[in-house]
Image: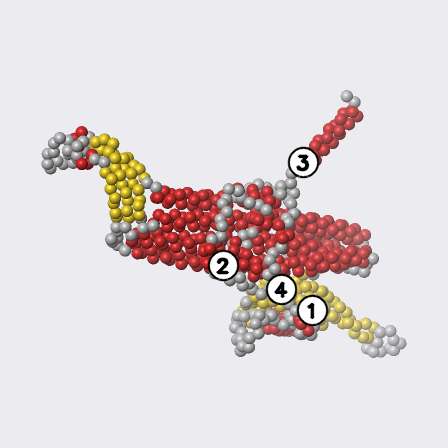
């Protein structure tokens, strides 16, 4: 065959293969979120274990119910008994005997009826524990599902961010090679490119980990295409109190504790039956005896009514009832715990929904503004009106703004899932269900035993106009311009500040004194602010850092040090001070002035010259040591 025809045939075959692959992928049905959740709650090992516990409890109740019915047994005996009196005519006690024994319980102090009731409530406890396991597993699955969508989107952001930084790096490299840009610009671009690559690796790792989480819950690897969730479109109740009322009606953890209380009350009644007599009707039918006792009374059929009344058994019955009473108290404590747990879960998640919804609006505005500024900075950089650092900063801020917006949107979805799970509503909101499970109606005792109060914490609302009206004048000295938040205005005496507590104004004063000692080139005073365990940034060691710092303090040049945007945060006996540092060393050179006079001294003047300048963002990490704040770390970034 001609080579040309061979090539054409192969090309056609390759195209047909590709089309068939595309058609096969397109023909694959989309696995919906409902289907994935239903698979999870029917195959997840933890849920399955709870399901079998529920079935076990049902069979246990049937075991107790069997005490209502008679029991029949065949009793065969063989005995060897010493003969004290010689009996004739087959009237002796038979050596061998077979009997059919039928026994029916007539009265047992209501022990069986109360035990059946107890096990019925126990079965409902296991049912609500199963419901709780399904809700919690679904919530955990929804977290993993939403996080999978999150990291798939964040990976795309990281890819775009890497491409932009790589393109900028290549452009700067061309400029440096052409001699129209500084080599330090290439170093900055290279550093930001490395950061973009690290961010991409981080997002890829996050997606790998969340995929493993989904595989553990779902049982299989998640599909390539995930359906966008819509379960939260129904919204939530108008207030946190209404959301709590619904949670107290349906939360499976709370309902299981209420059922357990009923089970323990019936267990007490079951144990109290030991104080009552037991009546049994018993019938014995002889199936045949040995010939030596065929005419004896022992060979006759018997119908008898027996009573068993326990008079004393070492106070075991009384202590058993006390033991069960403590079980009842424990069940009520667990009910109270379920109340406060449900209140905390629903209240926090409900507040997160409101806060994240508002936060999303601000993050959308921030992303739009940064995107516009980014485009403007690119154009200004091309005509030399913006520095490379400006351009790299906007690229990084744009990347971070998109990440923050995406995280806020996905966190909002998870917050809805948390509220629904706390209310026992998550499966219904998703539209998923597990078959072969009964539906229990709400009993009156559930309302009687439900003592939970639907009182949620008040959501904090900031009056921005009042905040600005009461603000302090703008100053670099204060870490915070706003007045501290006070939940309740109560007139109290001024508290005594302990030696280990952190005070913002005190740490701020230390930072200003540290800067003042540097400006004054007071080496001893300045270095006293550093702790003995102070560790400088790598690759410098402490000896090298100390040498460089002393040189900057003993120089004849004038030190100009300006701190801007100082922010101090406290955490017990530790504190952090972040600020922008503008540092300059200014020296003087003697220059000859242009003059016609012959006096050389008269014709010379001192001209200030900046010998070193840097502008960086710095963080001082303090720790209270021997009742003094000392610096343990000093971090610098451009």
The disc label shown at residue 339, or none: 2
Whichever of labels 2 and 4 marks the residue nearer the N terminus, that label is: 2
Residue 259 percent coordinates (x, y): 44, 53
- How packed mark 4 is, by other alpha carbons closer than 10 Å (few <14, some 14-19, many 20 or more), is some
Q: Earlier in the sequence, mark 1 or mark 2?
A: 2
Q: Which one is nearer the viewer's eye here, 373 or 361?
A: 361
Q: Nearer the viewer, mark 3 or mark 2?
A: 2
Q: Is residue 376 above or below residue 37?
A: below
Which of discs 1 and 2 lies nearer the camera? The answer is 2
In the rendered image, is residue 8 in sight?
yes
Residue 426 location, x and y as percent?
57, 50
Where residue 42 sits: x, y (%)? 53, 42
For image coordinates 66% across by 52% down, the residue present is: 199
> In this figure, which residue is indicated by the disc labeled 3?
27
Q: Residue 564 shows which numbered tag?
A: 1
Q: Nearer the viewer, residue 524 or 368?
A: 368
Q: Is residue 545 shown to the viewer in this render?
A: no
Q: Secondary structure beneath disc 2?
A: helix
- Helix, strand or loop at label 1? It is strand
Q: Could you say whether the residue bearing mark 3 is in a helix, strand or loop?
A: helix
Q: Specify the label residue 634 is tagged with.
A: 4
Position of residue 383 in the picture relative to residue 483 (left or right) = right
Q: SS at mark 4?
A: strand
């Amino acid at each position: 065959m001609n080579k040309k025809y061979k090539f054409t045939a192969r090309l056609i075959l390759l195209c047909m293969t590709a089309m068939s692959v595309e058609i096969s992928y397109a023909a694959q049905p989309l696995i919906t979120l409902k289907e994935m959740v239903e698979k999870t709650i029917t195959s997840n090992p933890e849920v399955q274990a709870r399901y079998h516990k529920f079935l076990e409890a049902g069979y246990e109740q049937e075991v107790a119910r069997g005490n209502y019915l008679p029991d029949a047994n065949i009793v065969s005996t063989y005995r060897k008994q010493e003969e004290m009196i010689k009996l004739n005519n087959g009237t002796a006690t038979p050596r061998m005997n077979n009997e059919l024994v039928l026994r029916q319980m007539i009265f047992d102090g209501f022990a069986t009826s109360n035990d059946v009731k107890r096990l019925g409530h126990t079965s409902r406890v296991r049912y609500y524990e199963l419901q709780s396991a399904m809700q919690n597993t679904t919530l955990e699955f929804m977290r993993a599902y939403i996080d999978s969508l999150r990291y798939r989107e964040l990976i795309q952001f990281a890819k775009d961010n890497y491409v932009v930084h790589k393109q900028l790096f290549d452009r700067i490299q061309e400029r440096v090679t052409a001699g129209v840009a500084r080599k330090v610009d290439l170093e900055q671009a290279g550093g930001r490119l490395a950061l973009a690559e690290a961010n991409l690796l981080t997002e890829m790792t996050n997606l790998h980990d969340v995929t493993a989480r989904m595989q553990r819950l779902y049982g299989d690897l998640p599909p390539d295409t995930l359906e966008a969730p819509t379960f939260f479109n129904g919204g939530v109740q108008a207030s946190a109190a209404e959301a709590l009322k619904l949670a107290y009606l349906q939360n499976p953890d709370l309902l299981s504790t209420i059922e357990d209380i009923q089970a323990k009350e019936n267990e007490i009644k079951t144990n109290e039956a030991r104080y009552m007599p037991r009546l049994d009707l018993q019938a014995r039918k002889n199936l045949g005896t040995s010939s030596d006792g065929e005419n004896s009374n022992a060979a006759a059929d018997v119908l008898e009514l027996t009573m068993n009344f326990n008079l004393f058994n070492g106070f075991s019955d009384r202590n058993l009832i006390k033991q069960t009473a403590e079980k009842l108290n424990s069940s009520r404590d667990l009910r109270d715990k379920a109340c406060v747990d449900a209140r905390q879960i629903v209240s926090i998640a409900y507040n997160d929904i409101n806060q994240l919804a508002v936060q999303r609006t601000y993050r959308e505005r921030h992303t739009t503004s940064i995107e516009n500024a980014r485009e403007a900075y690119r154009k200004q950089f091309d005509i030399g009106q913006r520095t490379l650092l400006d351009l790299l900063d906007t690229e990084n801020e744009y990347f971070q703004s998109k990440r923050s917006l995406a995280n806020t949107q996905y966190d909002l979805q998870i917050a809805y899932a948390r509220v629904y799970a706390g209310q026992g509503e998550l499966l219904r909101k998703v539209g998923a269900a597990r078959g072969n499970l009964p539906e229990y109606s709400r009993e009156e005792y559930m309302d009687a035993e439900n003592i939970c109060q639907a009182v949620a914490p008040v959501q904090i609302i900031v009056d921005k106009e009042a905040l600005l009206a009461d603000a302090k004048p703008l100053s670099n000295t204060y870490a915070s311009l706003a007045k501290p938040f006070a939940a309740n205005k109560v007139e109290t005496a001024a508290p005594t500040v302990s030696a280990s507590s952190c005070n913002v104004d005190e740490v701020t004063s230390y930072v200003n004194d540290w800067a003042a000692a540097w400006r004054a080139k007071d080496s001893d005073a300045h270095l006293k602010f550093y702790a003995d365990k102070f560790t400088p940034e790598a690759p410098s060691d402490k000896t090298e850092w100390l040498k460089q710092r002393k040189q900057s303090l003993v120089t004849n040049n004038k030190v100009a040090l300006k701190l801007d945007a100082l922010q101090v945060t406290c955490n017990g006996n530790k504190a952090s001070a972040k600020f922008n540092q503008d540092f300059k060393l200014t020296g003087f050179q003697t220059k000859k002035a242009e003059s016609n006079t012959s006096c050389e001294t008269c014709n010379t003047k001192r001209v200030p010259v900046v010998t070193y300048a840097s502008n960086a963002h710095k963080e001082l990490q303090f720790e209270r040591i021997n009742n003094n704040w000392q610096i343990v770390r000093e971090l610098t970034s451009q």
